[in-house]
Amino acid sequence: MSVPRGLRARLAVAGVAAGLALMAAGCGGGSNTSTGATGSSEITKAPVALVPTAKAFGESVAASSSAGQMVAATTWGVDTAVVKTWWRPSNGAWSSPAAFLPPGFHRSYDASAATLSDGSLAVVAGVDLARRKYCLDGASVALMRRDPGGAVQSSIVDDQHGTGRLDDRPMIAAGSGGQVWVGWSQGTLAHSCDVIGGDDRIRIARSSDNGATFGRPIAVPSAGIGPDFGVQIAPVGSGDAWVSWSALSSRGAARVMLVRVQHGQVIGAPQTVASVAAVPQLLPGATFPSFSTPTITIADHRPVLAWPHWVAGQAVITIGARIGPQGQWRYATVLPGRGQDLILPALATQGDGSLRLVYAMHVRSTDAVGYASCVIRMVPSTGRLLVGPTEAVAAPVPGPGFHELGESLQLTADRMTTTTALTVGSSRTSQIISVVWHVVPSRAAPTGTATTGSS
């Protein structure tokens, strides 16, 4: 039996016990500094928005350029949800929120952000007609661009008005030379009230003019075990990208999938990176839904992924690096503390060549959510992953604080900074914070530990 979609579904669990939140051991230490492949980083955190209302904000994302920074987040009203954006010039104050809602649509959700090669900042979001409170109608993919001069344009990447199909969970990724990729899940109205559309399939579209126009969407072959959702894209070069997503079976199994797309063509059959047990849609003690979706980046010319999954009654995060031409993989696993679950991983390749992992921690006893990060070094000759110590980004705050937190966090990175936005929710307040890591070059040797394996 299907469950209403997550904008959509206000899932609740009664009887959450009171208790103290503890930081997870996470990436393998208790340090508040992180050491990367060739150096360290300094973190800057700034409040973007704060309201004295619980469950006011959902998933949040950010992108930055030399001109400034933009944050986008799903905001929740009494009966609907709308993506709003905040902007600030470099070292300036945050603007008032602006609704991202193209003409003809009445609801927006599931934002994703990117910095384009011309310095524009872009956000994509799902938009629909909001005819039914917990279901999608006419669900499509919209894009907003803010160019370096401050001009804002919006457009529809994929319009499903009146087609009998619907789009969901869009994401955006930017490459060099004007390359912009947008991906989403597409299903039918028969599954418009599902948390995960029962017949969802992956679609992607590419622009070569910084998002002004897009080519015809490409259908990515299905894994064939159930819905395909949570698409992530890592551009490699002109018309070239790696695409990853999750395939979920009705029995709670998940496959992390990967395929390469070049100049409009899917190259070969999708590869199964990992077959795992999916994270339960409702974690123990949680009042918001969780998902098993991957994140992807490119390091040393190879794809590196991370994904949450269920092991021995807890949600853990595994990182996988592709090694060798035959598609072998080397893994490292991040383990939670007792009574905690790790969810919502996001990976990015930083300007010094190291990888940054950010993830959320859920504390079962208090329905608290906090955030942590670590730096990962990959040994180029072997693909071995060295995972550095944990960096506490935001301590867990007792909930319930969310309607939902989306499918994954998101990081955007350039030569000197790595940027994200995080939603911090409690039973009384909702807050969005901007987080920026500044790369500090160093010749110090990297340190770290890892649990590794290969296949």
Image (cartoon, grey):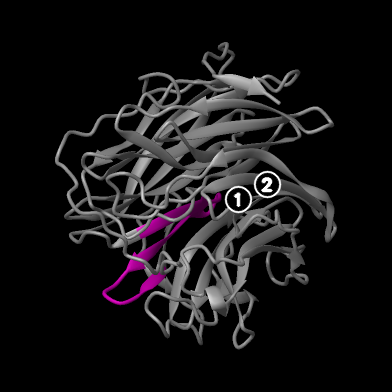
Q: Which residue is mark 1?
A: 246
Label 1: how many Cα within 10 Å (few below 14, some 14–19, many 20+): many
Q: Which residue is mark 2?
A: 257
Kindly report the distance in space between the C-alpha atoms of the residues bearing marks 1 and 2: 6 Å
Residue 294: x, y in percent?
57, 45
Q: Can residue 350 be seen from the camera position used here?
A: yes
For badge 1, the amino acid type reads: Ser
User: Which of the two residues, 150 or 137, is positioned nearer the viewer here?
Assistant: 137
For badge 2, the amino acid type reads: Met
User: Which of the two residues, 165 or 234, is positioned nearer the viewer here?
Assistant: 165
| Left or right of 262 in this view: 28 | left
User: What residue appears at the point 43 percent right and 27 percent down from the top-left corner?
Assistant: 335
The disc at residue 34 is none
| Left or right of 148 in this view: 61 | left
| Left or right of 347 in this view: 83 | left
Disc 1 element: strand
Q: Look at the image and give the residue range highlighted in magenta.
A: 58-83
